């Protein structure tokens, strides 16, 4: 009776060890799944930041294009201003009214040029700001990609651990089953 009890206890302990090993394998698999999920979320966020960086770069390009067009407009107005100055200074034009209105016209052009220069400066500041934000988004995207890769590496490690526990449990299961069969039929 004691030999049977000892065998039963040994087999019970073996099966308990198998259950423990399978539980550890299950825990590591669950951790690996969570890490893969985190990696996917992080990768999605990285793609979002990369997309934002591209949009900001395009916006900066459009702002610079507008600034360039505004500079071209300034050149045209400066040409008009020079032409107006020639017209006012012509000796043929001696009427005070025309000189007065010509001076007002040229001062209006100077004011417009000044405002356009301010607009160009503002557009260039905005473009520089967009570029800076794009650089920040690219850096964040790279950081998130690295984090995602690290999560995937950890998930792989956890999967390896889970596979190791599962293999140990399988080997122990086979050995225990063989021992049980041998106790039942000693001729095996």
Image (cartoon, rainbow, N blue to C red):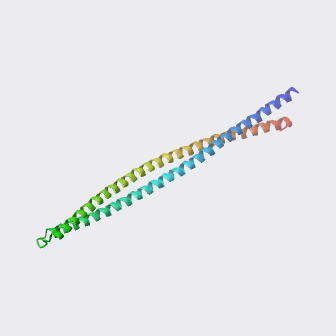
Tell me residue 70's x, y (percent).
31, 62
Q: Which residue corresponds to the image point at 65% horizontal and 43% vertical from the top-left?
A: 30
Question: Foreground residue, 60 or 15?
Answer: 60
Residue 179, located in which quarter of the rendered image? Answer: top right
What is the residue that sits farthest to the left in this orientation? 91
Whether residue 130 sits left or right of residue 177 in the image: it is left
In which quadrant is the N terminus drawn? top right
Q: Is residue 69 left or right of residue 44?
A: left
Identify the residue at image location x=36%, y=52%.
128
Relative to 98, 163 lies left or right: right
Q: Quadrant of residue 61?
A: bottom left
Q: Quadrant of residue 11?
A: top right
Q: Check the image and report above or below for 29 versus 54.
A: above
Q: Residue furthest bottom?
A: 92
Q: Please state which of residues 34 and 130 is positioned toward the viewer in this rendering.
A: 130
Specify the quadrant that holds the C terminus: top right
Image position, residue 48 (x, y; %): 50, 53
Give the camera-side residue of 178 and 158.
158
Find the residue positioned furthest to the right.
1
Q: List x then y, in percent, for residue 176.
A: 77, 36
Q: How many marks?
A: 0
- Work out which residue is located at the far front of the displayed protein and give it: 97
Left or right, 102 with reference to 43: left
Q: Position of residue 88 (x, y in %)?
A: 16, 68
* Above or below for 178 versus 85: above
């Amino acid at each position: 009776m004691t030999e049977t009890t000892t065998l039963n206890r040994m087999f019970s302990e073996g099966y308990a060890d198998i259950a423990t090993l399978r539980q550890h394998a299950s825990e590591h698999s669950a951790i690996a799944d969570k890490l893969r999920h985190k990696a996917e979320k992080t990768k999605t966020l990285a793609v979002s930041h990369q997309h934002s960086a591209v949009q900001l770069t395009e916006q900066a390009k459009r702002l610079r294009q507008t600034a360039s067009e505004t500079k071209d407009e300034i050149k045209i107005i400066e040409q008009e201003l020079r032409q107006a100055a020639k017209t006012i200074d012509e000796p043929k034009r001696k009427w005070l009214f025309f000189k007065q209105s010509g001076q007002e016209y040229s001062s209006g052009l100077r004011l417009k040029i000044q405002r356009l220069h301010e607009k160009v400066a503002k557009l260039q500041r905005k473009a520089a700001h967009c570029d800076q934000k794009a650089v920040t988004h690219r850096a964040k995207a790279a950081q998130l990609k690295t984090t995602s890769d690290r999560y995937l590496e950890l998930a792989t490690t956890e999967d390896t651990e889970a596979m190791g526990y599962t293999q140990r449990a399988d080997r122990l299961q086979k050995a225990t089953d063989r021992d049980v069969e041998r106790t039942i039929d000693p001729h095996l």
